Amino acid sequence: MKFFGSNRKRFSVAVHFWVLFSLFFAGSALGAGGGITVMPDESLFIQIVNFLFLIWILNVLLYRPIRNILIQRKEKLSNLEQNIETLSSDADEKDSEFSTGIKDARARGMKEKEALMQAAADQEKEVIEKINKKAQADLAEVRKKIAKDAEAVRASLQQEIDAFAEAIGEKIIGRAI
């Protein structure tokens, strides 16, 4: 059973009683040497009751409200510390999620880039094939035209060959053929 509450309170009461009694006995020791002698009478018990009443009043009016405020403050601080820990862990989770999201986005970006590069390479092949086909068609057409022109030139030269052959033969022989 607690007499006055907590250990602090008991210690405070004990210190007050010790001071009171030490003053009382110190005063009686001084009285033996011819000084003021203090003799305990009923006023001592009234002072003790007055002191105890004062301690009780101070406890009710001052100490208990201050202790309650300190307890509330301690609870509030512990709640704030819990909130800090919770928010810190949430921030760490969100940071890791953000990092993971960035890695995933980079991976998706690289895949899309590769897909676009592949599509561009395929399109480039198609364009080059079209250009090659057109160049081949143009080349074939030019060859046909050149062959046609060569045939036309050959035909016209064929007609002139007989005239040239006669002229050369006349020059070589020196007379008309």
Image: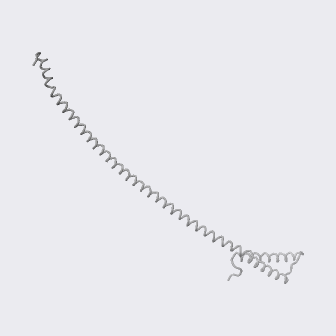
Q: Nearer the viewer, residue 76 or 142?
A: 142
Left or right: 75, with 12 as reference point: left
For this orientation, the residue located farthest to the top is: 174
Q: How is the image coloured?
A: one colour
Q: Nearer the viewer, residue 117 or 27?
A: 117
Left or right: 67, with 163 as reference point: right
Residue 153, image x, y percentages: 19, 30
Q: Nearer the viewer, residue 22 or 154?
A: 154
The C terminus, quarter of image: top left
Which quarter of the picture shows residue 47? bottom right
Residue 19, image x, y percentages: 78, 75
Residue 70, image x, y percentages: 68, 71
Which quarter of the picture shows residue 4? bottom right
Residue visible at 86% across and 80% down in the picture = 39
- Reply above or below: 16 against 141: below
For this orientation, the residue located farthest to the left is: 177
- Reply above or below: 137 against 96: above
The N terminus, quarter of image: bottom right
Left or right: 96, with 175 as reference point: right
Residue 38, image x, y percentages: 86, 78
- Reply above or below: 34 against 155: below
Residue visible at 78% across and 80% down in the picture = 53
